[in-house]
Image (tube, grey):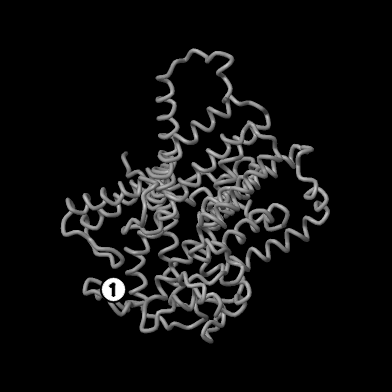
Amino acid sequence: MTHNAGILDGSPEPSALSKNIISKTYNKLFYIENPTSKRLRPTAYLDGLRGFMALLVYVHHHQLWAHGAGPIPLNAVFENGYGYKDQRHFATLPFVRNFFTGGHMAVAVFFVISGYVLAAKPLSLIYDKDYPRLLDSLASSMFRRWFRLYIPIFVTTLVYVITWHFPGYTVSNCDQQSNLRDELWNWYAECKNLSFIYKEGAIWLTFNVHVWSIPLEMRGSLVTFTALLALHRAGARMRLLCTAILTWYSLYVADAYYCALFCAGILLCDLDILHARSSPEYPQFLTRLGKYKTVLSIIFFVLGMYFAGVPSHNNDVNNLRLSPGWGWVSTWKAQAVYDYKWFYLFYASVFMVASIPNLPIKGFFETKFCQYLGRISYALYLVHGPILSSIGDRVYYAFGWVRLESDESMEYWMHWFSLARSGPMGLELSFLVPHLILVPLTFGMANFVTKYVDDYAVSLSANLYKYVVSSGDPTPAPASDRHIA
């Protein structure tokens, strides 16, 4: 006798089968192995710190986007100091403000970490006096760096602008073309300008303004590789001195804060390697201060967190002088620095990165949460802006965050679930609830982009380098030419 398959013959229920299919599909598309499933590297805390900083960028941009809406935009209140023009809010308190508008601090920390990480392997090879491998390492890093940074930008922005026309929707933060052909040409024109890292003037992509830092990341990377190559034959103390001079020159003379941040990262990495190897060339004054390292680290971390909250609404240093707690500090700014916030963010980021390894907070950045954030940090940085300006804008409209200059296409979304703006500024219920939608969406997309775009960009750049160098002469160079002159 025949019977229908089902529970009695051990087949899964339809609902269980559906759940299994959904689970497998989700894992296939979005699952990323957590780095903590493997043994953590000594510098894993830097990965976690970078990831947490990417989260602060997300928070910063959402705070400004939502609170820029309404009859009284609050962006200036957020980005100025506590008590500025008698505006006093919990979100603008010193130290606290870094968790609401810490995006600028995050970019500075990104640059210091990049300088540190990019220098780690070459410096180790320098101390091992393995100059042939050093040359190979620097050549490979310089070749791969542009592809690794720019391919994810090109892919994510191309998909983003195509969705404006298929399925089709409007965004409020940039001009859209009337047809896909013109849109693609505009995308190409802007991306080609961004791709040249020495382009003068503005380096903005109108359809994702947050990637302005990537050309600076590329420039700082080249400064790192060049400095390591130029100084690889120098003694450790001379290299430290030259790197310190280059850092000072970049910040106090050239107004190249991003170069100063990268160079500071090199300096910190060099010092850590010397200390780990118990090298006699490790600065003696730092050895003598070693017994006070915990106290000094606390002091520097606190100073770093304070400087990280520098008011940053505009470039006018007079605005800084009017902010309570910053009047005297405003006189410290170097004359060469145009945008004053980067002067203070230089010290903020260097102090924090230097002090964290000696403090219990290092353990926080080694947790699964922060390691996961570090794993998806670049993709999160790239996708949070497009999601914010497309879906996020509509979600905020639905919860009552409506701009005065609203266009007709957005009227449909207004006040679907309007909630009272109750609670402290930056923690209003109507601001927090939308993130029940936006956080899973943004992080899910960051997972996807990490797995299918970012990881492929890394492997593609490595394979392309192998292919290019494989075309060279495999015969070893003469002994006199094997080392860098």
Residue 164: x percent and y percent? 24, 58
**Residue placed at 44% from the left, 66% from the top?**
61
Q: Is residue 443 visible?
A: yes
Q: Secondary structure at mark 1?
A: helix
**Nearest to the observer: residue 480 or residue 390:** 480
**Residue placed at 50% from the left, 47% from the top?**
220
259, above or below 65, in the image: above
Horizontal placement of 182 versus 428: left or right? left
Horizontal placement of 468 versus 228: left or right? left
280, above or below 100, in the image: above
Residue 145: x percent and y percent? 45, 39
**Residue placed at 36% from the left, 45% from the top?**
196
Can you tell which quarter of the image residue 108 is in? bottom right
430, above or below 253, in the image: below
Horizontal placement of 440 versus 231: left or right? left
- Quarter of the picture holding the N terminus: top left
Q: Is residue 28 visible?
A: no
- Quarter of the picture holding the C terminus: top right
Residue 138: x percent and y percent? 53, 33
Furthest toward the bottom, the residue is 86
- Residue designated by label 1: 413
Residue type highlighted by circle 1:
Trp
**Nearest to the observer: residue 111 or residue 361:** 111
Residue 56: x percent and y percent? 52, 62
**Nearest to the observer: residue 255 or residue 111:** 255
**Nearest to the observer: residue 93 or residue 300:** 300
How packed is label 1: few (under 14 Cα within 10 Å), some, or many (20 or more)? some
Can you tell which quarter of the image residue 280 is in? top right
